[in-house]
Image (cartoon, rainbow, N blue to C red):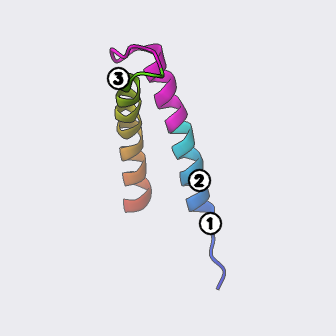
Amino acid sequence: MKSDNTLKTMTVLITIVFLIMAMKTAYAGTNGSSSNPGTALFWLDAAWIFTLYEAPFLLAVFVA
């Protein structure tokens, strides 16, 4: 039986898009970030934004 990896591929691609969006948003400093990718605050903002965007998507994909 062959496995269809379409859902897995789509999930990985959209996850990468959300990661890029999170880093761009954190870099813009919209959440109080220092806008410096070398600081811990930047990475915390990026992680928070990524989680905020990614959680509903993964929930929708894997529950539905």
Q: Earlier in the sequence, mark 1 or mark 2?
A: 1
Q: In the figure, 14 relative to 36: above or below?
A: below
Q: Quadrant of the C terminus?
A: bottom left
Please give the label number shown on residue 41. 3
Whole-percent x and y of residue 26? 43, 22
Q: Quadrant of residue 8?
A: bottom right
Query: What separation in Å lies between label 2 and label 3 (alpha carbons)?
Result: 30 Å
What residue is shown with label 2?
Answer: 10
Left/right of residue 63 with respect to residue 28 in the rendered view: left
Q: Which residue shows up at 51% across the image and 30% down it?
A: 21
Give the mark nearer the N terminus: 2 vs 3. 2
Spatial CA distance of label 1 from label 3 is 36 Å
Q: Is residue 64 visible?
A: no
> Are circles 2 and 3 on residues that touch, CB within 8 Å?
no
Q: Are marks 1 and 3 in contact (CB under 8 Å)?
A: no
* Residue extent of the magenta highlight: 19-36
* Residue 45 location (% of width, % of height): 36, 26
Q: Is residue 38 left or right of residue 1?
A: left
Within 10 Å of the Cα at label 2, are there few (<14), some (14-19), or many (20+) other Cα atoms?
few
The kind of residue on which mark 3 rests is Leu
Residue sitting nearer the eye, 10 or 20: 20
Foreground tag (1 vs 3): 3
Residue 38 as seen in the image, left or right of residue 41:
right
Q: Is residue 16 left or right of residue 50?
A: right
Image quarter in which the N terminus is found: bottom right
Q: Secondary structure at mark 2?
A: helix
Res 5 label: 1
Can residue 9 be seen at all in this image of the molecule? yes
**Residue closest to the far bottom:** 1
